[in-house]
Image: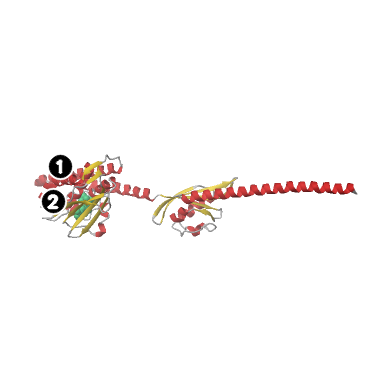
Amino acid sequence: MKKRIFHKLAFLGASAVAITVLLGKIQGQQRMIRRQMEELADDRGTIKAITGNMREGLIMVSPRGTILSVNSSAIALLGAAPGDWAGRDIGELSQLPELSAALSSALEGRAASLTAWCGQLFCRLFANPVYQERELTGAILLILDDTEREKSEKLRRDFSANVSHELRTPLTSISGFAEMIETGMAGENTRDFAGRITRESARLLTLIDDIIRLSRLDEHAPTPMGRVSLTAVCREVLTNLSLVAHRRGVTMKLQGPEVWVRGNARMLEELMTNLCENAIKYNREEGSVVVETAAGSVPGTVTVTVRDTGIGIPAASFQRVFERFYRVDKSRSKQTGGTGLGLSIAKHLVECHQGSISLESTLGEGSAFTVTLPEAG
Ligand code: ADP
């Protein structure tokens, strides 16, 4: 009897040990699973934080086109409403044909790269298939905002087309007049034709100089900057232009306190020359030009305004006059030897100085161009 009880107790003891070992194992496994889940949550958090802070749009879709994950940049780039899009069909997020074409290709196992206008934005789309152990498990789509590059590319294309056109016009006149002289068709007009050739050639040279100037500015070469008296620069420009102004019966005046800016004296002289030449060119007989310096409304800035009593600029052209080759009145600009590049050069020069340029004008009454520049410390 005693022996049986002893055996039973021994058996129970052994079972308790086994159970304790088992419990220990289960607890160990539970700890491991908890740790792994925490690690996974951490990983997901990290991935979410990374994709959430990306400027690029990132979308992951299942083979059926269900959104597995989408970051906020993708939602914004595609112009969709902010919110949780996971679990919904990609077609609900965007109906852009290029996007669905890129995704279809990726879901068929072929990487695709396309460009598309998403509203106001020009986007580059990259779609790649995703494989796990050779099995296609979805696709990943990357969306990049390429608007700035596209805009500058378009500007460059337009500029090249405009340059060819602008060069062609005087060259056609020159060769036409020269041919008439050569074939004896000019007769007694020879001198007149020769004069026209001279004028057109001068226009061509000015145009080429302006084009070269603009492309140099486009290179954004470092500009040596220093402490410059803007007042002294303006005084110099007015002296240089006094004869031209006098010929047109326009009076010029400099007023305001002496202001100092951080800049490049030669560039500032070029800027003020462009603005003052226009103020003379587009003025009326007996008109006036006032160049006025002042402290800027923002501390640490100064302004210079070139005000004329000329023909004025229509409000619809306020932005456009700074575009390359844009003229309000093409024939008047050409008559006065204009190239349509002066104000775009001026804007470039202002931007090189981290400044800004603005325009106020009333048709038939005059225009005022105001340049704001950083004050010299
Ligand atoms: P342009 O060589 O033709 O003068 P700009 O780039 O200097 O070229 O100016 C662009 C256009 O803006 C001019 O053709 C003219 O129509 C207009 N414009 C510029 N300055 C003035 C001004 N002070 N008054 C009236 N119109 C102006």
Name the amino acid type tagged 2: Met
SS for tag 2?
strand
User: Looking at the image, which is closer to me, 12 or 198?
Assistant: 12
Marks 1/2: CA distance? 45 Å
Residue 252: give its label: 2
In the rendered image, the quadrant that contains the C terminus is top left
Q: Is residue 181 above or below residue 357?
A: above
Viewer-side label of 1, 2: 2
For the image, the number of numbered tags is 2
Q: Where in the figure is residue 259, as x and y percent of width and height? A: 21, 47
SS for tag 1?
helix
Residue 182: give its label: 1
Q: Where in the figure is residue 281, as x and y percent of width and height? A: 16, 52
Q: Where in the figure is residue 165, as x and y percent of width and height? A: 26, 48
Q: Earlier in the sequence, mark 1 or mark 2?
A: 1
User: Looking at the image, which is closer to me, 265 or 182?
Assistant: 265
